[in-house]
Amino acid sequence: MPCGLRYTRAMDWTDDGIVLSVRRHGETSAIVSLLTRDHGRHAGLVRGGAVRRVRGFLQPGNHVAAVWRARLAEHLGTMTCELAAPVAADFLGDRLCLAGLSAICAIVDSALPEREPHARLYEATVALLSALDTTPAWPSAYVKWELGLLAELGFGLDLEQCAATGRNDQLAYVSPRSGRAVSLAAGEPYRDRLLALPPFLLADGETGDAGEVSQALQLTGYFLEHHMFAPRSKPLPAARDRLVDLLVPNATD
């Protein structure tokens, strides 16, 4: 159940979070990175986090109720976590869903500025993690989540109308330079230099087939790489590459 937000003193907070990554620290502790509802991506030292009992629920994708404390706001601080929902365990027997979960957590952990609130992204991520377990067409939702992540961080694509004609019909491409949609007719002479725009990305609730999802992953991957990771001399997370490797072969079935 959501624990809500409660301040106790200036450097203490309580919040809901999704485990993104866990890194061992010393013999028994761990540095845990969370995507929280009200405090964005936030890390803290969990004492005993490397002990089997605690390590068992500090798995990427799990929902936790977290309490963070520090003497000063800029400190790493200590964190205590209680399991709220064991999401990761649901996917242990499903290679594709587990790859999706790993990609979601890795991208957020790598791309999001630390301690910058992104409540909409938190809610969208909660919904996507739920879709992994309940919606067979979740790869389409995943790609739309990546589009939302780009928009949340200021790199949103303009897919409303053609950059050349101003019309909103037969949108078929995206310019890699401007991130704006281009119609089929206007883009035809330059198609080799444009990115394909699968139709399902233009409508809420629509899903794409395997080929369209593959095209959409190329589209979002291009902008993730060039606008969010390359400027920091970082590659796209390996977990995303593994997900693409699992999804893209299906496009040729």
Image (cartoon, helix red, strand yellow):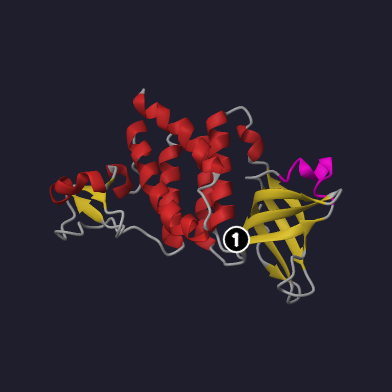
Quadrant containing the C terminus in the rendered view: top left
Is 182 placed left or right of 205 in the picture? left
Up/down of 83 relative to 250, above or below: below
Image point (64%, 31%), residue name: 92
User: Which is more toward the observer, 226 or 208?
Assistant: 226
Most common SS among magenta residues: loop
Q: Mark 1 points at which residue?
A: 37
Image point (47%, 56%), residue name: 230
Q: What element carries label 1?
A: loop
Up/down of 81 relative to 4, above or below: above
Magenta stretch containing residue 176, yes or no?
no
Q: In which quarter of the image is residue 87?
A: top right
Residue 158 seen in this snapshot: yes
In the image, residue 11 lies at what x, y percent? 74, 73
- Residue lying farthest front? 233
User: Which is more toward the observer, 225 or 206?
Assistant: 225
Residue 184 seen in this snapshot: no
Bounds of the magenta span?
A: 48-58
Q: Quadrant of residue 180?
A: bottom left
In the image, residue 71 lies at what x, y percent? 80, 74
- Residue lying farthest right? 27
Of the residues shown, which amino acid type is indicated by label 1? Arg
- Residue lying farthest top? 253
In the image, residue 1 lies at what x, y percent? 66, 52
Is 1 placed left or right of 188 in the picture? right
Image point (52%, 60%), residue name: 232
Up/down of 140 relative to 108, above or below: above
Magenta stretch containing residue 55, yes or no?
yes
Image point (86%, 48%), residue name: 27
Neighbours of disc 1 within 10 Å: few (<14), some (14-19), many (20+) = many
